[in-house]
Image (tube, helix red, strand yellow):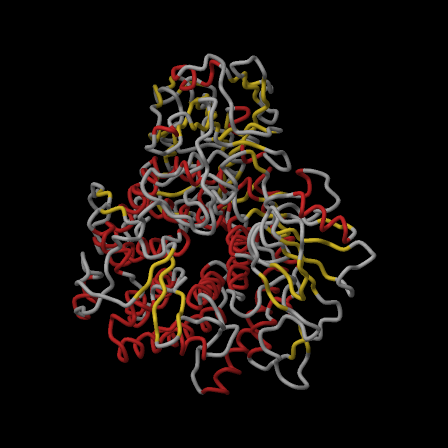
Amino acid sequence: MFTTLALAASALAAPDQRAAVPISMSRVSLHGGWKAAQDANREVLMSLNFSRLTCHFTTTANLTACADEAVPWHTYTRADPSSSNFTGKLGFLAAGDDARAPAELPFERCEATCAQMSACLGFSFQAADARPVSPVTCYFKKELHFTPSSTQGNCVAPGGDGRPVCSPLPGEMGRGGYYGHYQGHWLSATAFLVNATGNKTVAAAADGVMRVYEDVMGAWKAKYGDDGYLFPFDPLVWDQLLAGHGAYPYYSVPFYTLHKLMAGLLDQHTHAGSALALALVSKMAGWVARRVDATIAAGGEALWQQVLLTEWGGMNDVLYGLHAVTGDADHLRAARRFNAYVFTAPLAVGVDDLATQPFPHANFHLPEVVGNARAFELTANATDAAVVRTFFDALTANHSYATGGSNSGECWQRPRDLGNFLSTQTEESCTQYNVLKVARHLFQWGAEPRYADFYERALLNGIVGNQRRPNMADLADAPMTSYIYMLPLGGAQFKAWGKSDYGFPCCWGTLSESFAKLSDSIFFASADATELFVNQFVSASVELPGDGDGGGGATLTQLASDFTADTTSTLAFAVPAGAAAPQLALRLRVPGWLPKACAGCVLLNGKPVGGAAAPGTYLRVPPPSARGWSDGDALELRFAPALWTDPLNDYHAEHNATLAFMYGPLVLAGVHLQTDIFVPRGGTAAARADPSSFIVRNSSAGKPLEFAATSASGATIKMIPLRDVTDEQYVAYFMTAGTKPPQPTLGYCPHSAGAGDDAAPLVEEFDEQSFVSAGPPSLPPSATTDVIRSRGVTWALHGDRMASHV
């Protein structure tokens, strides 16, 4: 069953006529907590050994040889969480969630620690002996993504004889995985840091890595004569994938990784000014265009649509972005090819098809939508706009949690069927990263405050709390910044911190980018540069445009050490002597989470301005005089959050009392709890809807937020923002009826009953000319394909082989 949504009219009449334009990060400086997060992220990125960072690339291109592993990796796994019997083998567990932070422990303690945690399925360590006497660093994992290893190291190819040796990154997955993707994220993250901070050390490191990739590309050209190939394995991966057989066992998702590499290089050009990066990514785009054209020539659109059933990231997005830089029509044409009709065609006509895909993997499809948004900005194609708007409206109306995030086990469920999927695997950091991109594009089209409201909520609840910095707690076994793959929202759980310099799953990459570009969506300018949007209330400064080339020397500094804790943000102008007085008007976001309109909550130089400020709008504040803004002019914003209840987005009666409690934009978590069953004082539906009747703030202004909630029995629990939880056992969604609905056993990518059965068919025939000129058609022609669907994973039969399209 599909859910049909109303379509909004296009906000853009012509290419790139945006209502709000991002301000370069080079003009924005962070202060306070967000700067600390940015700095901690930079230290992780720069701590990596760069020969290890590029090792999978250089060994497969025979530029290096794989180093012998002097100290092998060992892994012990158990068949199920109830077993205490572990089986050992050479290799390690990478990717996936950590069951707990890595720890320096004796072997017996490693085994006992994993056995005591039902979530822990195995642990890995590096040691000369399989059962060492001395303590080792143990990595505890919830998922068994095993990489075989031996004394020959963890390279996917031996490399060239007599070449310099290297070893891959610690814990980086081997053959059959999606190794190499993180290196693209690393390039993007360092590009953002160069733009945001001007750090020359970071720029030099990125340049060194790109020069290695230039050598790798040259080596593949010398071997095969085809310029533009850059990938951490031989092109036979692509021969198999583009013939419709998937890339297994050599690789999992080749285009996904290729997108990350190309996006990283494009970011290095657009954000860090690298000419080398542009040359490399342009050659890669040429290689892509040639291979795609050859695939369609060989098997038609039916074959190509089958290829697109293997996750391909945002290939459309990066090719559109490259076209915006080069103007090359081949880049635009190649970008248009990356359109999986099975997903976009229903969205184009207003249908929520998120859960009915052959494989409804959230981070598979989210980057596609980001590409549609970029396409709309370049071409004003109404179909692209419809896809993006329908998708976002469907996601937020039918599939989202209180955090602004979505999906369980990396996949979407049926509309408003979320209660049975609350678990440790709800929600994934990668999807939050990409949905923020979608919201950011939509905000630019019409400057609608609802998108800025969503951005705040999703960022504060699903990104900034997913980095655990050393100063957040003094734990000797986790001194480096850690990240979260999944942010558990169901039950009484712990955040599963993982070492940010080990394993390198997808979310290590997206979080590395996220904390490198925190400054990119605080301020926006109107298209004519006459207005400045203030979207996020964090401590930061922005260099203001003058009346000439965008400089002017004046700055606007926002001081908001913790806006939700002290409820005040101050914006102060600094206009040096002789500098042009800023003439622009300010548009201040009045948060949609305010309980009612507030009069006198915005003051200019100590006096109320603008009348009553309505929630979910922008308050326009012009310069105080004809001369513009003067040095020392200041605005004070007093937007006081209130407590409110956000019921779980589920239509089943048994989840009517599954609730999250909010304070302004923040999800409040109960900490030090063993259960998610909590009946509030009063016990009635009316009481549950009014959390101020049983929750009180017990921290003073300017101090970290802390609350106390009283139960029907008179007991109290401590509550803090979910973003501030570090090592406490916590609850995000409370079962307030006093009982808990049965929870099914969930595996990877759990589905609602029947999901996928009515997915749209694949394309067999299509009109190339109409596709190139007008964009994707509204609906694909009917077609059939020989597939087997099982738990959302589509398998295609090829003779006596079966290849997965995951």
Choose between 45 and 137: the one closer to the eye: 137
Residue at point 17%, 63% (across, down): 781
- Residue 10 visible in the snapshot: yes
Residue at point 35%, 77% (across, down): 799
Which residue is farthest right?
Answer: 133
Residue 619, image x, y percentages? 35, 28
Residue 489, image x, y percentages? 49, 37
Residue 387, image x, y percentages? 26, 51
Residue 57, image x, y percentages? 56, 73
Q: Quadrant of the N terminus?
A: top left
Q: Is residue 215 left or right of residue 260?
A: right
As drawn, 326 above or below 760 = below
Circle count: 0
Res 789 → quadrant = bottom left
Choose between 24 and 300: the one closer to the eye: 300
Q: Quadrant of the C terminus?
A: bottom left
Q: Is residue 560 left or right of residue 793?
A: right
As drawn, 164 above or below 114 = below
- Residue 527 visible in the snapshot: no
Res 414 → quadrant = top left
Choose between 741 and 314: the one closer to the eye: 741
Q: Is residue 594 left or right of residue 786?
A: right
Residue at point 79%, 51% (across, down): 106
Choose between 139 and 340: the one closer to the eye: 139
